[in-house]
Image: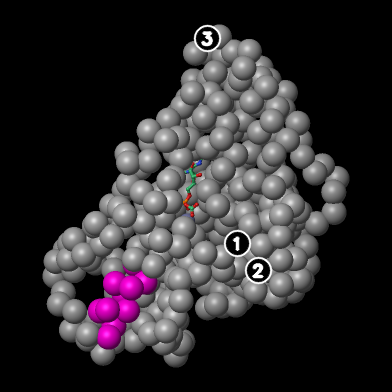
Amino acid sequence: MVLRAPDGTVRVLSSVVSTQIAKHAPYGGVVPEIAARAHAEVIDVIIGEAMSQARLGFDGLDGVAATAGPGLVGGVMVGLSAGKAIALARGLPLLAVNHLEGHAVSARLSEPVDYPFLLLLVSGGHCQLLEVEGVGACRRIGSTIDDAAGEAFDKIAKTLGLPYPGGPALEKLAERGDGSRFTLPRALLGREGFDYSFSGLKTAAARLAEGLETEQEKADLAAAVQAAIARQLAERTRKAMAAYAQQQVDRPLNFVVAGGVAANRAVRQALTDAAAGHGFAFFAPALAYCTDNAAMIALAGAERLAAGMKDGLDAVARPRWPLDEAAALASPTHLPGRKGAKA
Ligand code: KG4
Ligand code: ZN
């Protein structure tokens, strides 16, 4: 839960995260039914804990923010219903927040980041570049044409025998590896636009992983994969930075990376270098706010509330909910193939 001081600085009064990773780990990925049940089991305890850590009663709140999508709809419905119940019982405004908008503002939990900014959102479910003009105003200029970057980390980690979630485990293994030992394909080289692709890398890595015998070889492949993902993210982002800089005449150049993959140090470094090379100020969330958390949703809600927005109690949970609805309509996300759901 987040409070916002009048001068615009953000103070996180409490941030309670309940992880259900252990419940999904035996299956090597998230099981939707287990996720929905796990949400329902803990939601009231978590809300109670967050309120007591913040030393606040419900009457001390200005509004209630809840994620309304996109994502596994069972869990989203649990959180949104709880938010609606508090809003109704206490007569508070409800903010039905897009999960991706939470990631978009997550860097602002730790330090001020002025609008507008160029945003790279890299998580387990999404990989997209957006121009963010202000609260709720985004334009998508690039996205993955197949897998999301976090998904690539997770799937390749699995072929290396690493536990779920694979991204952090792969990063740890890569510390002991020498990435120069393997050559991996470079996707979309020379291609126009700012899209990403990770499926070729995934296939190549899976094939290489089959023939590995020693722990050192696995660490070397992990290092090569991490470097390849960081390189592609940075290469395509550099192109977007160059184009963005041309169009932002006399405006500040701010770059933000957010989402679970932003926790990866190699990725952060590659993007820090890219930003420096193009004259952008670089911002990334504190590590704890890269992966999913309630604080970023509360902040997105607080920003919406301050901008005079609010939602009705009939707000629905949405499995799919693009940040840039116009771009999504132009290339629909519910169709298979290019620009599929993970974009
Ligand atoms: O944002 P997030 O918590 O959930 C989604 O909205 O998807 O991102 C989770 C993703 C997972 O794919 C996870 O493997 C990846 O972020 N991730 C990482 C690291 N920490 C989390 N990938 C690479 N290196 C990390 N340190
Ligand atoms: Zn997320």
Magenta highlight on residue 85: yes
Which structural element holds mark 1? strand
Three-letter amino acid code at the position of disc 2: Glu
Is the residue under label 1 in contact with that under label 3 (CB below 8 Å)? no
The reply, left or right, for residue 280 in relation to residue 167 is right
Question: Of marks 3 and 1, which one's residue comes earlier in the chain?
Answer: 1
Which residue is denoted by mark 3 in the rendering? 214
Q: Quadrant of the C terminus?
A: bottom right
Range of magenta residues:
79-88
Provide residue 282's location: percent of width, then percent of height: 56, 56
At x 49% / y 13%, what residue is drawn? 215
Is the residue under label 1 in contact with that under label 2 (CB below 8 Å)? yes
Provide residue 15's location: percent of width, then percent of height: 28, 60
Which structural element holds mark 3? loop
Q: Residue 261 got which mark?
A: none
**Label 2 neighbour load within 10 Å: few <14, some 14-19, many 20+:** many
Which structural element holds mark 2? strand
In this picture, is 30 found above or below 195? above
In this picture, is 196 found above or below 326? above
Q: Residue 131 got which mark?
A: 2
Three-letter amino acid code at the position of disc 3: Thr
